[in-house]
Image (cartoon, grey):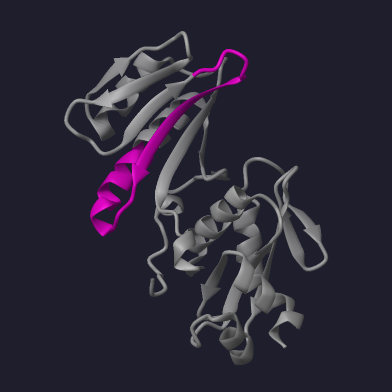
Amino acid sequence: MWFLDRTIRQLRSSPAVLTHRPPDPAALEAVLRRYAEAPLGRSGDWFVVGARDEVKVRWVELTPEQASAAGVPADRRGAIVLSGGDRTLRSFIVNTVAGRLGGAVHPPAAIDDYLDVEVRMRKSGGVGCDEAARMIRPFLGERIVEHDHSDGVCRLVATAGDPVEVTYNWPVADPEHIVDLELDVRGPADLPAVEALYRAASAIAEATGATVVCKDFLVTRLEDLIPSADRLPG
């Protein structure tokens, strides 16, 4: 009666991260503390991520019986399972944890390799769109700035077909100006573009004291942006 086992129920109903060995709780906690939107909480054996739409996260050691009943590969002996909360945040968590700790996103349909990196600048210490274009030029090449100040969004368009899309957002009512860098990572061939994106974001952050965020988690190194190479059969 698998439905009496909460771990099996969660693996069958919500995205998770599967590992070959039981996860390191301290390493998992360290990643979850990098969530930028709210402090990390605890509730029993769960970590609690998020503010209003909380997602609960815990690590487990899987038995062969649990793996079989949950429909996961027999060689997986650890899992990071989620419960409740917002669907988007659950996706952010499993993909971020898989990338930073190593592990496979389960099910494979939940994999999200699209990078949407935000450089969040305070108005008082930030730079404008033209200066941002100048700062990213050594990494992403020449950019033409298409201004749309009425909507508070400017596009920094590549002149040489660079795959990284860049926009500059400066909503009037928001205390932050954001340089948004996006890239669809389709495989190892895109890793040089990931590095260029990271270098560009870091250059702006270092010059302005800004914060770099991806999937709502703080980014402090290139490895934070590289998707997990551990994949389950699709």
Q: Residue furthest right?
A: 44
Q: Residue furthest left?
A: 160
Q: Residue at x 62, y 63 (%)?
A: 28
Question: Residue 207: where, in percent of width, then height?
Answer: 44, 26
197 inside magenta stretch: yes
In the visual, does 176 lie left or right of 164?
right
Q: Is residue 16 above or below residue 146?
A: below
Is the C terminus in the top left, top right, bottom left or bottom right quadrant?
Answer: bottom left
Q: Quadrant of residue 58?
A: bottom right
Question: Residue 34: where, in percent of width, then height?
Answer: 61, 49
Q: Residue furthest bottom?
A: 65
Is the N terminus in the top left, top right, bottom left or bottom right quadrant?
Answer: bottom right
Residue 23 in view of the camera: no
Q: How many numbered discs, if any?
A: 0
234 inside magenta stretch: no
Residue nearer the viewer, 197 or 71: 71
Task: Report the magenta residues as a range.
Answer: 170-199
